Image (cartoon, rainbow, N blue to C red):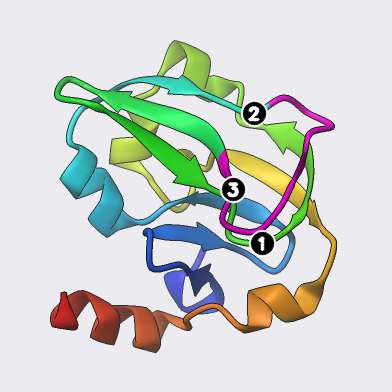
Amino acid sequence: MNPNDLRYTKSHEWISADGTAGVTDHAQHEITDVVFVELPKVGRVCKSAEACCVVESVKAAFDIYTPVSGEIISINTDLSGNPGLVNQSPYEAGWLYKMKISDDSEREKLMTYEQYQEFLKSN
C-alpha cells in the first residue's frame, strides 16, 4: 500500500479507500516490539474514533481506534501467529482489519499523507 493513498488520524491510525486499516509507521515505532494483537470481531459495527482493538508491546497495551464508522468485515489472522508484522510492515502485511465504510465523507475528513507529516512535525 502506498502511504500517499491513505488517510490518517491524530491517534496514528490509517485507512485505505477499500477500508483496510492499521497503525502508522510512527505509531509502531512508539509502540516498539509488538507481542500480541487483540483484533475486533468480524461483524462488529464501530463508530468513528471508537476503540476497536488492542496492540500489546513489551512495554504497554495500546487501544487502536477506528478511523471511520463502519462494520468490520475481515481481520488479519496472520497477526495471531506473528504480531511483529505490525512493526515489520505496518502498511502491508501488518494491517489490522478491513471495514465496510458507512460514510465515505468521514474518510475524506481525515488527514492526507502530507497533512499527517506536518502533524507529526508539530507534535
Q: Are marks 2 and 1 in contact (CB under 8 Å)?
A: no
Residue 68 tag number = 1
Which mark is nearer the camera, 1 or 3? 3
Q: What distance separates the C-alpha of mark 2 from that of mark 1?
A: 14 Å
65 vs 108, left or right, is: left
User: Where does the magenta region start and end?
Assistant: 41-51
Which mark is nearer the camera, 2 or 3? 3
Residue 50 tag number = 3
Mark 3 or mark 2, which is nearer the start of the sequence?
2
Residue 40 tag number = 2
Crowding at dot 2, Cα within 10 Å, few <14 / some 14-19 / many 20+, comes out as some
Question: Which quadrant of the figure has residue 62?
Answer: top left
Q: Secondary structure at mark 1?
A: loop
Indicate the amino acid at tag 2: Pro
Residue drawn 37% across the image and 44% down it: 89
Q: What distance separates the C-alpha of mark 1 from that of mark 3?
A: 9 Å
Residue drawn 38% across the image and 59% down it: 11
112 vs 74, left or right, is: left
Indicate the amino acid at tag 3: Glu
Q: What distance separates the C-alpha of mark 2 from that of mark 3?
A: 11 Å
Q: Secondary structure at mark 2?
A: loop
